[in-house]
Image: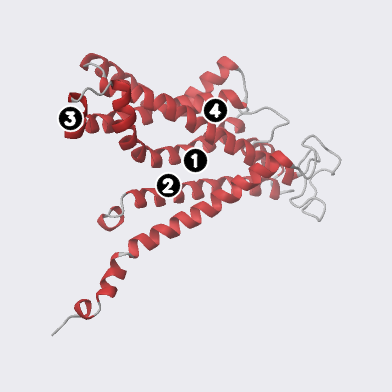
Amino acid sequence: MLTEAERNPRSRDTRSRRPRRRTSVNLLVGGVLFGIIAVVAILSLVALPFEPSDTTGGRLQPPSPEHWAGTDRLGRDLFTQLMIGARLAMLTGVGAVAIAAVLGVLVGLVAAMAGRWIDDALSSLLDIAIAFPTLLLAMLVVAWRGASLESAILAIGLAGSAVIARLTRVTATRVLAQDFVTASRTSGTGTLRLIRLHVLPNVWPTLIVPLALQFGGAVVAEASLSYVGLGSPPPNASWGRMLQEAQSTVLVAPTAAILPGLLLVATIIGINLLADGLRDVADPTGRTLR
């Protein structure tokens, strides 16, 4: 007697594709959440409802047709501040990830392709850098360069580069041990061409998900620095500083504290879902094995 799978092969194929369907949901939801924040950040470069320093809206006003999210304790439009906060969050994420990717990949490739003693030395330094708290390193950099968005991006990028360097070193070492790389070296391929043709194409897919997660970590780190006064100075509005300023008036005007927190949470959830979806696309069997 034929089983259901033998009578209808399509049902078996459909069941085998179900994990990929759940992966698509992660990508879709994460992409929508992250896309909304990115669109708001881009719109803040083109037009804002009010000037960031405009204090004519009245103190701690509730949401209204004129001020969609209300006003803060200085009379500034909260919706304008939230849009600027989205812009700073995106700039921080992109800048920190770019620094971490460039510096981390460079150090990781040097460690993988250099001699044993250089590899051991770099590996020890990477272990120390990974164990060093990100916020503490950020505070040291900000104390050295002054409180600014550029200082925060540099500090967060440097902290994240150690993780990327370690992952690049491990992956590149594994690629360099493959037979096709040995054959390429035997045929006379130079080091730079070897990296461009064989190493980087096999390393980048492994780095996509960690870099996406570091984007979310950079947004949280920037908000944390701004909360303690070490982020971007006024009139730039960071979600972290908005939370700090609103904590004294949270009972009178709760929207000033709730909205930045919700946007921060939505951004992190969107990035994490996006990274989870990217991981499952890169490794479709990963979800069924867990």
Mark 3 or mark 1, which is nearer the start of the sequence?
3
Near mark 2 (Cα within 10 A), the count class, few <14, some 14-19 or many ≥20, is: many
Q: Do the residues labelled 2 and 1 touch (CB within 8 Å)?
A: yes
C-alpha separation, residue under disc 3 versus residue under disc 4:
41 Å
Q: Residue 183 carries which label?
A: 3
Q: Is mark 1 on a helix, strand or loop?
A: helix
Mark 1 or mark 4, which is nearer the start of the sequence?
4
Residue 92 makes an appearance in the image: yes
Q: Residue 275 carries which label?
A: 2
C-alpha separation, residue under disc 4 versus residue under disc 1:
13 Å
Q: Mark 1: which amino acid? A: Gly
Question: Which residue is labeled 1 in the image?
Answer: 216
C-alpha separation, residue under disc 2 versus residue under disc 1:
10 Å
Mark 3 or mark 2, which is nearer the start of the sequence?
3
In which quadrant will I find the C terminus?
bottom left
Comparing marks 1 and 3, which lies closer to the viewer? 3
Identify which residue is drawn at 70% across, 41% down: 44
Question: Which residue is labeled 4 in the image?
Answer: 153
Q: Is mark 2 on a helix, strand or loop?
A: helix
State the residue in front, 114 or 185.
185
Q: Mark 2: which amino acid? A: Ala
In the image, taking residue 194 as reference, residue 177 lies left or right, namely: left
Q: Is mark 3 on a helix, strand or loop?
A: helix
Identify which residue is drawn at 73% across, 31% down: 235
